[in-house]
Image (cartoon, rainbow, N blue to C red):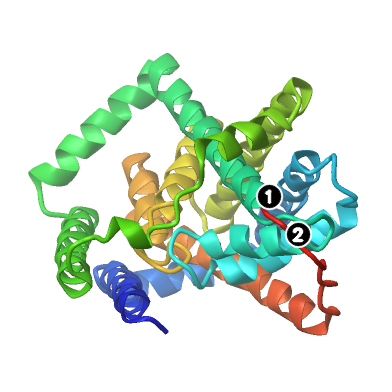
């Protein structure tokens, strides 16, 4: 492993472990155990169903629409999505998922750059729709805007576990960012891989307007299914969460998971999700329990993806691949 990648990997792993440990350590473990002890199995199963609908079914459909001009079946798109969860959970910001999918698509048609560009455009669409959904709730529902403003003020007015977590998160990011910068030395532009603008524009034009609208619609369905999952998960742990709160919590966890600070968003995503739920008046032990349940479901799906990858035959290689 190159020296730069080694430092980045170590820093990402340390950030994930420390943040998760801090989050759990700040909560009374007895209260946390009681919350998990009150788990309602039927509602937890319903939550898991909504989770699978969001991260596998709708995400797989997005991949299928994205590569509608490729010989890619829906079954293969779903498989790519599940296996991508496995690779994504061991790379910062889950970029490993995009790289794996691009390699698999490359076996269907020569060329690696265009599929990778498309997949990152798909990620941008998903994040934009997610942010727009959260912004819509906060702007058009004054009740939630006032609740969030009050929660932020009260959180930092008195030192609470969530505010301590946020301070630790900021400190860790600053510290390890400086560490990585020092270890890597000054940037060297000659070593950077730059994708020509014409390739990005070309990949964008390959997708029709109807498919762009379909991708936006499916991204909204992903957000909706994630919100349903969090509502059901909160209720399964004896808490309450409304539809608007579900959208805000889902958006917070997704946007935090996209930050390239830890492997698969570990620690960062849990803190963001627990923080939003706490701001929405969910008790802290329940908020942390929901965040941990979310991580458990992610790892369960990632494990399934890893098993599928192990038992699947390798993708056929494409001969004479040329990147024009």
Residue in view at x 36 percent, y 69 percent: 31
Q: Secondary structure at mark 1?
A: helix
Alpha-carbon neighbours of circle 1 within 10 Å: few (<14), some, or many (≥20)?
Answer: many
Mark positioned earlier in the residue sequence (1 or 2): 2
Q: What residue does disc 2 label? A: 106
Asked if residue 217 is positioned above or below residue 171 in the image, the reply reads above
Asked if residue 321 is positioned above or below residue 273 in the image, the reply reads below
Residue in view at x 39 percent, y 70 percent: 32
Q: Quadrant of the N terminus?
A: bottom left
Q: Decide if residue 5 is in sight here.
A: yes
Alpha-carbon neighbours of circle 2 within 10 Å: few (<14), some, or many (≥20)?
Answer: many
Q: Decide if residue 39 is in sight here.
A: no
| x and y, in percent, of residue 83 in the image | 70, 68
| x and y, in percent, of residue 285 in the image | 36, 61
Query: Alpha carbon of mark 1 to alpha carbon of mark 2: how far?
Result: 7 Å
Query: Camera-side residue: 187 or 128?
Result: 187
Mark 1 in CB contact with mark 2 (< 8 angstroms): yes
Asked if residue 227 is positioned above or below residue 75 in the image, the reply reads above
Q: What residue does disc 1 label? A: 115
Q: Secondary structure at mark 2?
A: helix
Q: Quadrant of residue 143?
A: top left
- Residue 248 lies left or right of residue 104; in this view the side is left
Asked if residue 39 is positioned above or below residue 25 in the image, the reply reads above
Residue in view at x 75 percent, y 59 percent: 106
Residue in view at x 15 percent, y 65 percent: 178
| x and y, in percent, of residue 4 in the image | 31, 75
- Residue 233 lies left or right of residue 283; in this view the side is right
Query: Camera-side residue: 65 or 70?
Result: 70
Query: Camera-side residue: 64 or 225?
Result: 64
| x and y, in percent, of residue 12 in the image | 34, 71
Q: Which mark is residue 56?
A: none
């Amino acid at each position: 492993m190159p020296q730069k990648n080694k430092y980045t990997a170590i820093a990402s792993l340390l950030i994930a472990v420390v943040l998760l440990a801090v989050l759990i350590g700040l909560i009374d473990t007895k209260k946390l155990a009681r919350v998990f002890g009150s788990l309602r199995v039927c509602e937890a199963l319903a939550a898991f169903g909504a989770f699978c609908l969001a991260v596998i079914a709708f995400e797989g459909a997005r991949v299928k629409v994205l590569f509608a001009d490729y010989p890619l079946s829906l079954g293969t798109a779903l498989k790519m999505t599940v296996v991508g969860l496995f690779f994504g959970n061991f790379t910062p910001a889950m970029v490993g998922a995009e790289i794996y999918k691009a390699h698999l698509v490359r076996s269907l048609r020569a060329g690696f750059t265009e599929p990778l560009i498309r997949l990152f455009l798909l990620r941008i669409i998903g994040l934009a729709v997610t942010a727009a959904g959260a912004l819509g709730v906060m702007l058009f529902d004054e009740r939630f805007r006032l609740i969030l403003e009050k929660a932020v003020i009260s959180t930092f007015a008195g030192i609470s576990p969530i505010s301590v977590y946020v301070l630790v998160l900021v400190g860790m990011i600053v510290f390890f960012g400086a560490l990585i910068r020092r270890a890597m030395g000054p940037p060297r532009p000659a070593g950077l891989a730059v994708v020509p603008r014409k390739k990005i524009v070309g990949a964008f034009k390959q997708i029709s307007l109807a498919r762009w609208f379909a991708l936006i619609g499916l991204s909204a369905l992903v957000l909706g299914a994630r919100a349903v999952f969090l509502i059901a998960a909160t209720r399964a742990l004896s808490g309450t969460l409304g539809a608007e709160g579900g959208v805000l919590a889902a958006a917070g966890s997704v946007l935090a998971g996209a930050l390239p600070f830890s492997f698969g968003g570990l620690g960062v995503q849990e803190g963001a999700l627990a923080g939003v739920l706490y701001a929405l008046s969910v008790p802290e032990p329940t908020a942390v329990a929901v965040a941990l349940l979310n991580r458990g479901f992610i790892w369960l799906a990632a494990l399934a993806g890893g098993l599928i990858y192990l038992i699947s035959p390798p993708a056929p290689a494409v001969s004479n691949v040329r990147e024009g």
